Image (cartoon, rainbow, N blue to C red):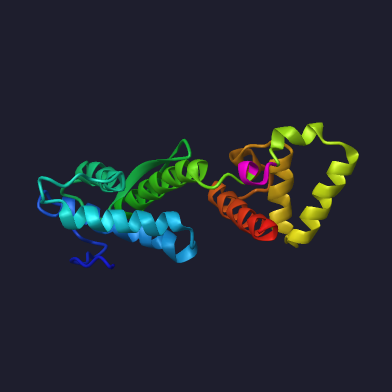
Amino acid sequence: MDFKCKTYACDEIITIDNVKELSEYLSVNSVKAFMRFSRVDFFFNLYDNLFRDIRCKNDYRYIFSPAYDIVMDAYCFLYSHLGKRLNDITKVSKYGVLKEMTILGGCMFILSKHIRQDLFTYNCKDIDICRKSELRINDYYDYSEDEWLKVDETIEKLELNESELKVLDCLISGKSLSETARTISCGVSTVFDRRHKLQKKYLSLIG
């Protein structure tokens, strides 16, 4: 499925007549941006749900999915800038600091933040490699020396690259995803992707 609607220029004026469709347009394109750089099923499911919500929004019987919350975030932000152009400068709180950026850039940042938070929730409910493999991180500390050797052998069979090994080392040591991201100096979403690849490699190895 693909979403088609009017396209907007960067100097588009935000009005009461176009703010809703503009919010939907930016929300769809924000999700598409994530889909271009990651093949995680979450983004494709999110896009499908968002597409369905927009198509069915005028049906009073339709129950919206949580994906439409992204549109609501965009709507609230853009509504506060009625009468201004998308390329006008505003201030947005970015990691606790007010930053100057265009209204368009600020809106996309807010949507990106929302989607990343949804991805975090999705990953928490996704396949739990610890449960699947019965190798729970908290149980590592009770392993005998022979059992640790088996763990090392398994890791060697996975043929991990340097970045994947760094993530695995952090997770084995008990660090959270955010702590891992700070330790190896990358974004939390990058840790998500690498952990997902680790899961797939391990589950493929054990069949």
49 in the magenta segment:
no
| Residue 2 relative to residue 123: left or right | left
Residue 165: % across, % down = 73, 53
Observer able to see residue 27 = no
Residue 196: % across, % down = 58, 53
Residue at the image point whose x is 48% and y is 39% from the top: 95
Q: Main SS of the magenta segment?
A: helix
Residue 161: % across, % down = 73, 61
Residue at the image point whose x is 40% and y is 62% from the top: 33
State whether residue 37 is above or below residue 99.
Answer: below
Q: Quadrant of residue 85?
A: bottom left
Residue 188: % across, % down = 56, 46
Q: Nearer the viewer, residue 181 or 82?
A: 181
Q: Nearer the viewer, residue 96 or 155?
A: 155
Magenta segment: 130-134
Q: Quadrant of residue 94?
A: top left
Q: Nearer the viewer, residue 60 or 83?
A: 60
State whether residue 48 is above or below residue 127.
Answer: below
| Residue 168 relative to residue 102: left or right | right
Residue at the image point whose x is 77% and y is 54% from the top: 155
For the N terminus, the image quarter is bottom left
